[in-house]
Image (spheres, grey):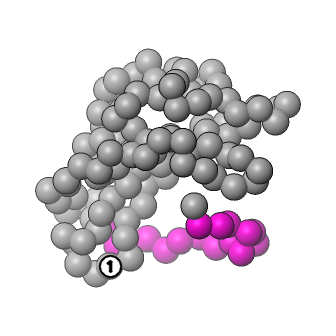
Amino acid sequence: MFSIRNTSVEAYAEPVVHEIKVRRADLLGDIRQPAKRAAYLALGGACWYVLGLDARGRNIGTADDVPPECGVLLLQNNRLEVARRAPQRPVERLPFSLWMALAKATPAATADDEAQGIF
């Protein structure tokens, strides 16, 4: 997921990448692709791995599984908790075509929006 700050000023967008993983195999496969991670980091000032639970309710990974240039959010008691903060990096500017696509996008509301807590 790619998010930006709600602003009409391009320089204030503060893009952030959230890579959401719900299977351990998917997490481990992604971690073995440094080029993919580099692409995430090139687009955002921060990159977070959001790690869900397996079928038995266990976390699919820990902060130790994720490279240090990325932050880690773990699902704990139905809430996302910071296991490791994502290092903030300055981002010069988003490519103009990407900025325009994001600026025109409308968030999709879900029936569960009220249940989403701020972490």
Give the residue pinned by disc 1: 7
**Amino acid type at image mark 1:** Thr
The quadrant where residue 28 appears: top right
Q: Nearer the viewer, residue 94 or 73?
A: 73
Q: Nearer the viewer, residue 65 or 7?
A: 65
- Residue 50 versus residue 95 in the image, above or below: above
The C terminus, quarter of image: bottom right
Q: In this rendering, would 82 be left or right of 114? A: left
Residue at 29% x, 59% y: name it: 98
Residue at 39% x, 38% y: name it: 70
Q: In this rendering, would 63 be left or right of 100? A: right
Residue at 60% x, 50% y: name it: 81
The quadrant where residue 109 appears: bottom right
Residue at 62% x, 43% y: name it: 74
Region rendered in magenta? 100-118
User: Which residue of the protein is positioned furthest toward the bottom in this rendering?
Assistant: 8
| Residue 96 visible in the current orientation | yes
| Tag count | 1
Q: In this rendering, would 97 be left or right of 74? A: left
